[in-house]
Amino acid sequence: MFEIQPMDAATFRQQTRRSTLIIAMLFLVLAMLFSTVAVQLFGEPGGDNLRFNVGGVFLAFLLTAALLRGRFWNQSWMAPAVYSWRLKRNLMSVTNVMHQVTAAVEKNDPIAMKVLRFYHQGLTQMHELDGNSSDHAQLHREVEQHKERMQALGLDVDQPRLDPAWLEALKPASR
């Protein structure tokens, strides 16, 4: 179950820039190191060593990815970036069944209403965190209409959680 967490957008952007910079610098250092070592061990002086340079960069990429997912993923300095990744992943899981969600919303299905409200709240937060106010303004009318519709049906408009079972219930094969 994913839950939307309150976050300050300016702090979020500062922390994600910092973590991105750390990972990028690590990759650059590893790429330079591995390329240099590969050329020194296997290369020819004055020869074409492009394949060794590319191999070193590729190896650095693999090691950086492994360190990112294995070692850094649970570190506190990576928490904002991980949260953003999880938020976007959950929004994408809703997007993947959006046709079914909107069809069920038209029939006042309470699960679909909750899923769409979560989607709106998550998308709003994502736009705020990313500093993307233009997309948020376009979505505002749709969000308000859906919120009013939920209130008219007596449904709770605060939907900070997404239960994966809700999405399964909306998929065509499970209906």
Image: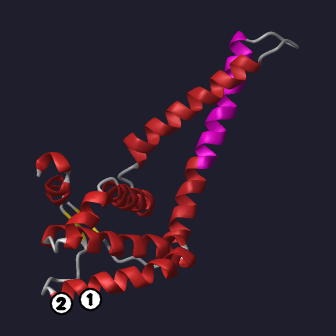
Give the residue at mark 1: 148
Above or below, comparing residue 51 to residue 173 in the picture? above
Q: Are marks 2 and 1 in contact (CB under 8 Å)?
A: yes
Horizontally, residue 161 falls left or right of residue 51, namely left
What residue type is disc 2 on?
Ala
Frontmost residue, 88 versus 71? 88
Q: Is residue 31 magenta?
A: yes
**Quick check: is 46 in the magenta stretch?**
no
Is 158 placed left or right of 142 in the picture? left
The secondary structure type at the circle numbered 2 is helix
Classify mark 2: residues with Cα within 10 Å, few (<14), some (14-19) or many (20+). few
Residue 152, labelled with which disc?
Answer: 2
Q: Which quarter of the picture shows residue 99? A: bottom left
Front-lying residue, 17 or 98: 98
Residue at position x 48%, y 73% in the image: 127
Residue at 71% over, 17% down: 51
- Tell me where residue 120 appears, x and y as whole percent: 35, 74
Give the residue at x 40% y 70%. 123
Spot occupied by residue 140 in the image (x, y as percentages of width and height): 43, 83
Bounds of the magenta segment? 24-42
